[in-house]
Amino acid sequence: MAQSAVTSPTDVVDFLTGQHDQIKSLFAKTLTVSGEAREKAFVDLRRLLAVHETVEEEIVHPRAKRKIANGDAVVGQRLEEEHEAKTVLQQLEKLDVDSEEFTRLLTELRDDVLEHAEHEEKDEFARLGQELSSEELESMGRAAKLAEAIAPTRPHAGVESQLENLIAGPFAAMLDRARDAITGKG
């Protein structure tokens, strides 16, 4: 049953794995361009990372905690990694995109995020795919797409749980979208 779910366009695992591919491409692009192009690529990367992590924290992690063996420990490790990534993203926002420090920090973040994605795909997504029906995975995929539409556009370190996202998420998203509109960086 889980085999057919993997190919479904609304399957949550397929949806998030596709975003991992987009994130990898955006890291590569951001690291190979400079100036205004780098600024734009970084804004796109930051936005996708913020949205992606919010979707995981609201939709995937709570289900994984309940459904997969040792779910609390697996999700706990991913949440620690997500917190660290959000903290680094906030540091990067304050740096000149063409500085050596920005490039060094972004390269470290890329390595950490790609390793994080690998662990998610192997330790969390694949195991959810084995435990849940295709209908459950598709329902989660639809919920993920809805959460993506209202997620914050910037990283918010310290907001890594489903409850924190539900409380802070809409307000943070509204502030992020207002800030993006004012600065023109959205």
Image (cartoon, helix red, strand yellow):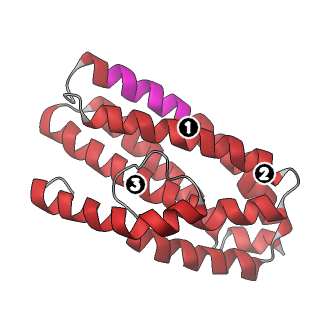
Query: Looking at numbered disc 3 in the image, what kind of residue is underneath it?
Result: Leu
Query: Residue, x 65% and y 44% (percent of image)?
Result: 78
Query: Residue, x 24% and y 33% (percent of image)?
Result: 94
Are discs 3 and 2 less than 8 Å apart at CB? no
* Residue underneath mark 3: 48
Quarter occupied by the N terminus: bottom right
Work out how far the residue at label 1 is from the one at label 2, CA to CA, in angstroms.
22 Å
Number of numbered discs overlaid on the protein picture? 3
Question: Residue 135: percent from the left, percent from the top?
Answer: 74, 82
* Residue underneath mark 2: 72
Query: Residue, x 51% and y 54% (percent of image)?
Result: 53
In this view of the protein, which residue sits in the foreground, 77 or 44?
77
SS for dot 2: helix
Work out how far the residue at label 3 is from the one at label 2, CA to CA, in angstroms.
25 Å
Task: Report if residue 102 is visible in the image.
Answer: yes
Q: Which residues fall within the magenta stretch?
A: 103-112
Q: Pointer 1: residues within 10 angstroms few (<14), some, or many (20+)?
A: some
Give the label, 1 or 2, closer to the camera.
2
Relative placement, left or right, of 26 versus 13 is left
Identify the mark at residue 114; answer none if there is no mark: 1
In this view of the protein, which residue sits in the foreground, 109 or 27?
109
152 lies above or below 145: above
Q: Earlier in the sequence, mark 3 or mark 2?
A: 3
Question: Residue 111: percent from the left, percent from the top?
Answer: 52, 29
SS for dot 3: helix
